[in-house]
Image (cartoon, rainbow, N blue to C red):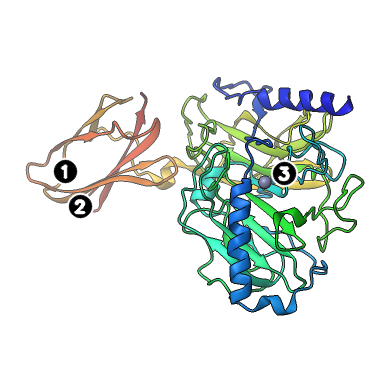
Amino acid sequence: MKNIIAISALAAFFLVPYLSISQIVNIEKTGTGSEYVIGTYDANNPEITDTEYLSIEKRCAKNFNLLGLDKNEKNIQSVSLSWPVRAAAGFTDCGYYAISAHVDQNIATGVFQDYNCGTVSYDGHKGTDIFTWPFSFYKMDNSQVEIIAAAPGIILDKADGNFDRNCASNTLPANYVIIQHSDGTRALYWHMKSGSVTTKAIGQTVVVGEYLGVIGSSGSSSGPHLHFEVWTGATSSTYNDPFSGTCNTLNANSWWAVQKQYAEPGILKASVHITDVTFPGCPTTETTNESTTYTIPFQGPGLAPDYAKFYLFMRNIPVGATVDLKILNPNSTIFNSWTYSPTALYKTSYWGWSKHLPATPGNYTFQATYNGLTCSQVFTMVAASSIYDNLNSDKICVSPNPAKDILNIVISDLKNGKCKYILNNILGKEIYRENILIESNTVQKEINISEFSNGIYFLTIDNDNIRIVKKILIQK
Ligand SMILES: [Zn+2]
């Protein structure tokens, strides 16, 4: 009965659709946010089908014999595992993952339980699912989270080149690596990004922590994550749970060198954005709208003048807990502060506030503290005059502004000769450039902007050592 209640509660939980934050709030005291619901599987829709298990068991058996590994088979687990994922070099967020499903410890059909007697699992699951959060597809596109060898061993099998933007359970093949350990145990690393799998050949050795691939959504997968599975022997029936706990009925000991705590509540990211983040849904890459530089005055799309969105991305923060948020001045005094207390327990959630930006140039810090741990992001306020010579120059006439499809530009009083004009988005990324020859001190151009997304852009014209900049709004 207890299990039935647990299942219906969980089913209801997973039926909650992804809630988008459509409204933009400019009132300081109000924030908006939501749980981020990840895709799920069940016994009828597994990540690795029985047919796929049989296929890899056969391939592994063949490679095992070819490599002469049969001579030292042991099958008594003695290796200890390191965490199988890491942030790529240059990635600076405070965290990047959450566990969406542990090994199912209840072998009965239709019920499931994790090693900690909780329900972070699904029926028949034989591995640990580590998914990237927030911005899973953005992280995948930019190869920000790598899968690494949890233990040293020999590459027993691998696959690459398969479609990696899958959103549902099906029979598509996965990109994967299977490592044979010296104690006879095996580790399976599933769902990698296409083209990211280690170039090492089957039979070559890997050391602990060695790069194996990038987290992706290949195979039967509802979004970018690593399915990590450990076997004591040569078949999927020998699967274990690397986590030890009261409800682990498969193996007594933890396989981890250092076992992570069950929920790991924390703040994965605290960041500043020019407007709301967007989660368009699998498999579209999310739009982060994040920036660490803001010009004074600042106009974020859809926001009140001089406001930005301050976001928190969280994992398992308990109901009633307090997160302290602060914007610190360059001298570390408080520019603004507020608190957040979740009203429901979410595996992954985000919350964003519209807050007034500082009006003085300098480096400011947005920080969020939960349970003594602080996650922070430095952002810079820059005086417009230090970047733009003449933001509102009347040498340029742009129409319409705001513009939708076509931008008509007329620039007068130019010096004849070479001239270039560049369109940058608010993050400074160049999105259009053209070199032209001025012949009658005037230029008239038409730019097709139908492919550009909404937002603030800067048109820069460089002519005879003079730079003219004009702010443009694209609004569809
Ligand atoms: Zn899995």
- What is the distance, in whole Å, between disc 2 and disc 1 at their CAs? 8 Å
Q: Nearer the viewer, residue 281 or 301?
A: 281
The residue wearing badge 3 is: 125
- Closer to the chain start, of discs 2 and 3, is 3
Q: Position of residue 243 (x, y in %)?
A: 82, 53
Figure check: 183 above or below 413: below
Quadrant showing the N terminus = top right
- Closer to the chain start, of discs 3 and 1, is 3
Q: Position of residue 174 (x, y in %)?
A: 54, 51
| Callout 2 touching callout 1 (CB < 8 Å) | yes
Mark 2 Cα-neighbour bin, 10 Å: few <14, some 14–19, many ≥20: few
Q: Nearer the viewer, mark 2 or mark 3?
A: 3
Q: Is 250 on the left-hand or right-hand side of 10?
A: right
As helix, strand or loop, the secondary structure at mark 1 comes to loop
Q: Would the CB of label 3 be found within 8 Å of ligand 1? A: yes
Figure check: 81 above or below 378: below
Q: Nearer the viewer, mark 3 or mark 1?
A: 3
In the picture, the disc for residue 141 is: none
Label tally: 3
Figure check: 280 above or below 176: above
Q: Is 440 on the left-hand or right-hand side of 6?
A: left
Quadrant showing the C terminus = top left
Which residue is at a point 39% across and 30% down the rendered structure image? Answer: 454
Which residue is at a point 87% across and 48% down the rendered structure image? Answer: 248
In the picture, the disc for residue 414 is: 1
As helix, strand or loop, the secondary structure at mark 3 comes to loop
Looking at the rendered structure, the kind of residue marked 2 is: Asp
Looking at the rendered structure, the kind of residue marked 1 is: Leu
As helix, strand or loop, the secondary structure at mark 2 comes to loop
Q: Is residue 172 at all visible to an observer of this figure?
A: yes
The residue wearing badge 2 is: 464
Write down the quadrant of residue 356 in the picture: top right
